[in-house]
Image (cartoon, rainbow, N blue to C red):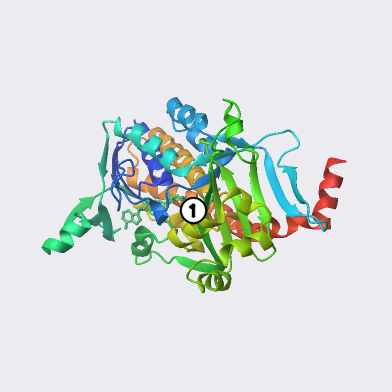
Amino acid sequence: MEKKQKIVVVGAGPVGSLAALYAANRGHHVEIYELRSDLRDPSTTPLNFTKSINLALSERGINAMRHAGQPKLIEHVMGATIPMRGRMIHGKRATGALYEESQDYDVHGRSILAVDRGRLNERLLDILEEMRNVTFFFNHKLTGADFRKNKAWFELRESASAGAAQGQRAREIEVDFDLMIGADGAHSAVRYHMMKYTRMDYQQLYIDTMWCEFQIQPRPTAPDASLNSKFLISPNHLHIWPGKEFMFIAIPSGDGSFTCTLFAPASLYEHLESDRTGALVPPFFDKHFPGVTTLIPPAELIDSFHRNPHLPLISIKCSPHHHASSAVLLGDAAHAMVPFYGQGMNAGLEDVRILFDILDKHARMDELMLGADASASRARALAEYTAVRVPDAHAINDLALQNYVEMRASVLSPVYRLRKFLEEA
Ligand code: FAD
């Protein structure tokens, strides 16, 4: 029998939550430490300070959830997705007429799925909450770790405003663990502390692109009761308004709305911000993203541009992804990538499946060699994980960077059209 271990997961985002679920299903004692309060609590400030992000969920991520040993997870998640069978390219002809062109992702009609990241995360937390071997520690920030002694320190964050007003000092707690899973996102504290123990190569790149979120609201009075009539544009596409140096995209949500994102260089954001009234925003959209101002009224465009944050995009590579038998990095903590391949979360969820496959394999080998040391077996498993996963993580990071050119420009190029024609011939 595999010896039960104490697994500390840092970060209760989608990747940390799925990792906790895999660990808990194996009977380990799981503790999840999360910097923010419970995201199911309406007063929690959402990630990136926007209401929700709609993501493209694809086979990598679905497969990882399928293997989580909780059929209701995949049922719940899949029930709240919208299939996107292709991308819809929006543009204007020389005559001035608007056009839409559907480009299917797959000759067999298979789709990627639009999913609300927040709701997916909530489903995972709901399932974890029912498990007796899982304990949550919200408002706990990792501040230090000793990966030789397997100890970590967390600052318990009281309500920030109350704390500041009363001058309270944050309380620190010490926690021990067999394995720490660092799923604490792009600016990972686990990774930072791991670097003191491991000769880790690390590379980070901010690309010259910022993003900001907008919304296309559902049709106010749907002509009939069918769900599709609530959408102002096709619900089964990822919509792209390419613009060579920038682009605007829209991903459907279950209520008939679309979450939209403007990706553009920092200099363009500065230019649009230079008029404080926002007056430059609608004409910019009219010139470069034809038809958008009929979907999002100019006043709403300006309001979203002012209200929602303008955020940078980071690409991170590191190696190894583990230290000895005591720590491993998953998801954005190991390989934050730009979003243009729609694979950041998917690859992070896949990390979880691959890590536990390898841990299981080494645990089985242990069982055969009676008395083998669990920590030595885990160290071998983590080394194998790094060997298997680092090249794949680097590859998807590079592909994601390259795909920005594809999405914002090549979708329109004659070469793209010729290639598609030849593929389909
Ligand atoms: P996160 O979601 O960042 O979660 C990390 C958690 O750790 C957070 O809850 C944070 O509060 C917590 N934390 C941080 N520091 C500490 C600390 N010191 N102590 C304790 N807790 C801590 N991916 C896709 O697969 N498909 C897409 O279509 C897609 N589109 C995207 C569009 C945009 C605009 C962006 C920005 C990203 C997109 N992604 C997409 C990427 C996806 O959002 C991320 O890859 C995914 O959220 C990473 O999940 P994670 O759990 O690894 O990290």
In-front residue for pair 313/65: 313
In the image, is 113 to the left or to the right of 17? right
Identify the residue at horizontal 43%, vertical 37% (top origin).
Answer: 360
Q: Where does residue 9 sit, x and y in percent of width and height?
A: 33, 47
Q: Residues within 10 Å of mark 1 (few under 14, many from 20)?
A: many
Amino acid at the residue labelled 1: Thr
Image coordinates of residue 34 in percent, x first then y, are 30, 50
Left or right for 395, reference 324: right
Total tally of numbered discs in the picture = 1
- Which residue is pictured at 53% across the width and 34% down the height? 81
Q: Describe residue 343's horizontal placement relative to residue 106 as left or right.
A: left
Image coordinates of residue 229 in percent, x first then y, are: 61, 32
User: For the residue with label 1, is its CB less than 8 Å from the closest atom of ligand 1?
Assistant: no
Quarter residue 1 falls in: top left
Quadrant for residue 190, please give it: bottom left
Residue visible at 55% across and 58% down in the picture: 338
Name the residue tied to disc 1.
386
Residue 184 shows in this picture: yes
- Which of these two is toward me, 175 or 221? 221
Q: Relative to 301, does residue 360 appear above or below in the rendering?
A: above
Which image quadrant: the C terminus? top right
Query: Could one spot residue 321 in this view of the protein?
Result: no
Q: Residue at x 48, y 67 (%)?
A: 201
Element marked by disc 1: helix
Q: Which of these two is toward me, 204 or 362? A: 204
Left or right of 177? Residue 282 is right
Give above or below for 32 relative to 281.
above
Q: Position of residue 411 (x, y in %)?
A: 74, 54
